[in-house]
Image (cartoon, rainbow, N blue to C red):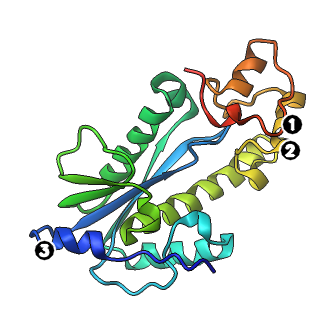
């Protein structure tokens, strides 16, 4: 288990200024070749005790599932937002991620007084906000949002694997693994692949070829 621990420090700094409901927001799936970007927003009860809340990437799938259930059950409110592959292509990856975050906030059953965001500043929201670098490793509510979003997206990609068999979405969840790239080259892009990402776009343009395993262009869109 990683020694990294999230704290209530950032939430407390807002509580001390009179803000009561503080929402943490984070996104997952930005670097995938397929599937939507998913964002989570979570308002936790002040000083709620849920052990092991931290960046979802530092947890096993089983731990994420257990923690997501506890977070959803005990949170003041939680919400999920999505940006589709088509929106990623139309808006660019960064703006699609921000759209998913805004939608996650709009999905909350309670309007937060302030918002803490992992790395980004979300445009067009009424609440004051704070962008925190590596917030999913520091801030309790942001880490909770990352867990809820990750579990939701993994379940969605498992369902999409049944709808689009052969690509292995249930295993790699849309990330650009060697297995995924081989399937993409063999089968061609599916309806849930991101057409603005270089490996997908190359195949759609008719000149695609398998990429070297260490070619990180799979992780960024061609804009």
In the shown orientation, is residue 93 left or right of residue 57? left
User: Tag 1's secondary structure?
Assistant: helix
Mark 2 vs mark 1, foreground winner is: 2
Q: Which residue sits furthest top?
A: 206
Residue name at image x 51 percent, y 48 percent: 38
Q: Look at the numbered disc 2 and give the secondary structure of its residue.
A: helix
Which of the numbered marks, if any, corresponds to residue 183?
Answer: 1
| Residue 49 figure quarter | bottom left
Please state if 30 lies on the left or on the right of 133 as rendered.
right
- Mark nearer the N terminus (3 vs 2): 3
Q: Which residue lies at the image location 70% right of the left edge and 45% below the top edge?
A: 175
Horizontal and vertical percent position of residue 77: 33, 67
Residue that numbered label 2 is attached to:
179
> In this figure, which residue is indicated by the disc labeled 3?
16
**Residue 165 shows in this picture:** no
Up/down of 36 relative to 109, above or below: above
Q: CA distance from mark 3 to mark 1?
A: 53 Å
Q: Are marks 2 and 1 in contact (CB under 8 Å)?
A: yes
Between 116 and 155, the residue placed more toward the observer is 116
**In the rendering, which numbered label is found on residue 9?**
none
Q: Secondary structure at mark 3?
A: loop
Inspect this view and state whether residue 64 appears.
yes
Q: Earlier in the sequence, mark 3 or mark 1?
A: 3
Disc 3 vs disc 1: which is toward the camera?
A: 3
- Kindly identify the residue that appears in the image at 63 percent across and 80 percent down: 1
């Amino acid at each position: 288990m990683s020694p990294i621990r999230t704290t209530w420090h950032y939430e407390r700094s807002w509580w001390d200024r009179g803000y009561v409901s503080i929402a943490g927001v984070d996104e997952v799936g930005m670097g995938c070749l397929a599937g939507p970007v998913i964002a989570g927003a979570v308002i936790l009860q002040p000083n709620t005790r849920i052990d092991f809340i931290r960046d979802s990437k530092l947890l096993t799938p089983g731990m994420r599932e257990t923690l997501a259930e506890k977070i959803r059950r005990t949170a003041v409110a939680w919400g999920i937002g999505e940006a589709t592959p088509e929106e990623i292509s139309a808006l660019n990856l960064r703006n699609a991620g921000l759209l998913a975050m805004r939608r996650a906030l709009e999905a909350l059953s309670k309007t937060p007084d302030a918002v803490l965001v992992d790395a980004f500043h979300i445009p067009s929201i009424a609440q004051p906000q704070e962008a925190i670098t590596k917030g999913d490793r520091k801030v309790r509510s942001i880490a909770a949002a990352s867990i809820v979003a990750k579990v939701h997206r993994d379940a969605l990609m498992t369902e999409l694997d049944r709808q689009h068999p052969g690509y292995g979405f249930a295993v790699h969840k849309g990330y650009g693994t060697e297995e995924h790239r081989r399937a993409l080259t063999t089968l061609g892009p599916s309806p849930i692949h991101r057409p603005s990402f270089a490996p997908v776009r190359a195949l759609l343009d008719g000149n695609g070829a398998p990429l070297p395993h260490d070619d990180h262009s799979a992780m960024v869109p061609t804009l």
